[in-house]
Amino acid sequence: MLHRENRIKQYHTSSAADLLKEVMGYYGITQSDLAKRIGVSQKNISDILNRKRYLTEILALRIEKVMGIPSKLLLSLDSNYKLQLAEQESKLNKEKGDSPLFLQRYSWVTV
């Protein structure tokens, strides 16, 4: 039986960069080699792998053609990762105080 104190444990959310690093390591592909294969600069790949930049739909499709990783998976990993970062930032902001912009009913509105 579940108790109220039981919570779903959140684990580290992976981004597309984590998956790309893993596959690159498995096949022994360098950043510059991957960049040449998908037609972008090595700096672009470096920024993606270091999470300074995220994948675009076109890059995800190119990576799918070269590495066989589904573009939907890559984009979904990045989307989930960015959402988790936003949630963490939101929690930090919430600790500073509730937003005065949160929707509240006006006292003069009649229903």
Image: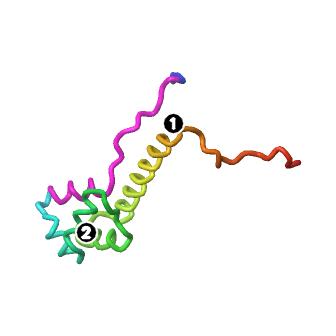
Horizontal arrangement in the rendering, residue 34 relative to residue 60 (left or right): left
Horizontal arrangement in the rendering, residue 98 relative to residue 48 (left or right): right
Residue 7 lies in the magenta-colored region = yes
Horizontal arrangement in the rendering, residue 31 relative to residue 92 (left or right): left
Q: Are marks 2 and 1 in contact (CB under 8 Å)?
A: no
Element under disc 2: helix
Q: Residue at x 27, y 72 (%)?
A: 65
Looking at the picture, does residue 42 appear above or below residue 23? below
Question: What is the crowding at mark 2: few (fewer than 14 residues within 10 Å), some, or many (at least 20)?
Answer: some
- For mark 2, what is the residue? 44
In this orientation, which residue lies closer to the viewer: 46 or 95?
Answer: 95
Element under disc 1: helix
Amino acid residing under circle 1: Glu
Q: CA distance from mark 2 to mark 1?
A: 35 Å
Residue 56 lies in the magenta-colored region = no
Which label lies toward us, 2 or 1?
1
- The outermost residue toward the left is 28
Query: Residue 50: x percent and y percent?
Result: 25, 57
Name the quadrant containing residue 77.
Answer: bottom left
In this orientation, which residue lies closer to the viewer: 72 or 33?
Answer: 33
Q: Residue at x 20, y 58 (%)?
A: 23
Name the quadrant containing residue 51.
Answer: bottom left
- For mark 1, what is the residue? 95
Q: Earlier in the sequence, mark 2 or mark 1?
A: 2
Instruction: Point out the stretch of residues depicted in magenta.
Output: 5-25
In this orientation, which residue lies closer to the viewer: 1 or 23?
Answer: 23
